[in-house]
Image (tube, rainbow, N blue to C red):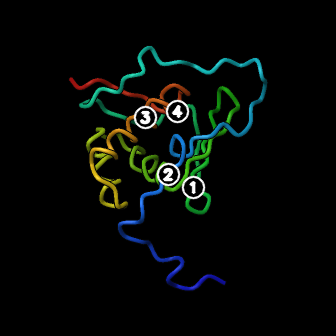
Amino acid sequence: MPTKTEIAPRKRQKFRPQRTWGLDVRQKRCASLALPVAPSSEIPPLGTVHVADRQVSCSVADETVILHLDEGVYYGLNAVGACIWKTIQLPCSVDQIVDAITTEFDVDRERCLTDVHELLVDLRKHGLITVKPHE
C-alpha cells in the first residue's frame, strides 16, 4: 500500500527526459495508414498551442495515454510529456508551457524550451495538437 509521501505531489522533480519525451506509437489499426503531417514543422514562439479535437487521453500513473480517434493509434507520454499535455488542455503559448515545466521540474529554461519545442513538433506531426499563429 502506498504511503502518504508516495502519493503526495512533488515540487521541482528531477528532470529526466526520455527520447522525444516518451512520445511513443503503441499500436496501429492498419500498417498502411499514413499519419497526417503538418504543413510546417515549426511552432511559432508566440503561437497558441491546444490539444486536437479528434483525440482522447487519460492519465495512467505519472504518464498520459493519447488515442488518435481518426487513425486508431495511441501514444504514451512520460511524466514530463504528461505535464505538457495537461498544460495544453487549455490554449496556451509555448512560454506558458515552459513556465509550467520549469516550475515543476529542475531544468534550465533554455534546455526546456528546446525540448518542449521538439515534443510539440512531434505532437503536431501526429495530428495530436493544433497550433495557431499569434494574431
Give the camera-side residue of 21 and 88: 21
> Which one is earlier in the sequence, the residue at label 4 or at label 3?
3
Please tell me whether mark 4 sits on a helix, a strand or a loop.
Answer: loop
Q: Please indicate whether residue 45 sits to the left or right of residue 65 in the image.
A: left
Disc 2 and disc 3: Cα gap in Å?
Answer: 15 Å
Please tell me whether mark 1 sits on a helix, a strand or a loop.
Answer: strand
Tell me what residue is drawn at x 44 percent, y 51 percent.
86
Q: What is the number of the mark on residue 128?
A: 4
Please tell me whether mark 3 sits on a helix, a strand or a loop.
Answer: helix
Give the camera-side residue of 116 and 135: 116
Tell me what residue is drawn at x 40 percent, y 36 percent.
50
**Which residue position is annotated with label 1?**
63
Tell me what residue is drawn at x 23 percent, y 26 percent.
134
Pointer 4 with pointer 1, Cβ within 8 A:
no
**Which residue position is annotated with label 2?**
82
> Which one is earlier in the sequence, the residue at label 2 or at label 4?
2
Q: Please indicate whether residue 50 sits to the left or right of residue 58 in the image.
A: left
Disc 3 and disc 1: Cα gap in Å?
Answer: 18 Å
Amino acid, disc 2: Ala
Tell me what residue is drawn at x 60 percent, y 63 percent.
61
> Which one is earlier in the sequence, the residue at label 4 or at label 1?
1
Pointer 1 with pointer 2, Cβ within 8 A:
yes
Disc 1 and disc 2: Cα gap in Å?
Answer: 6 Å
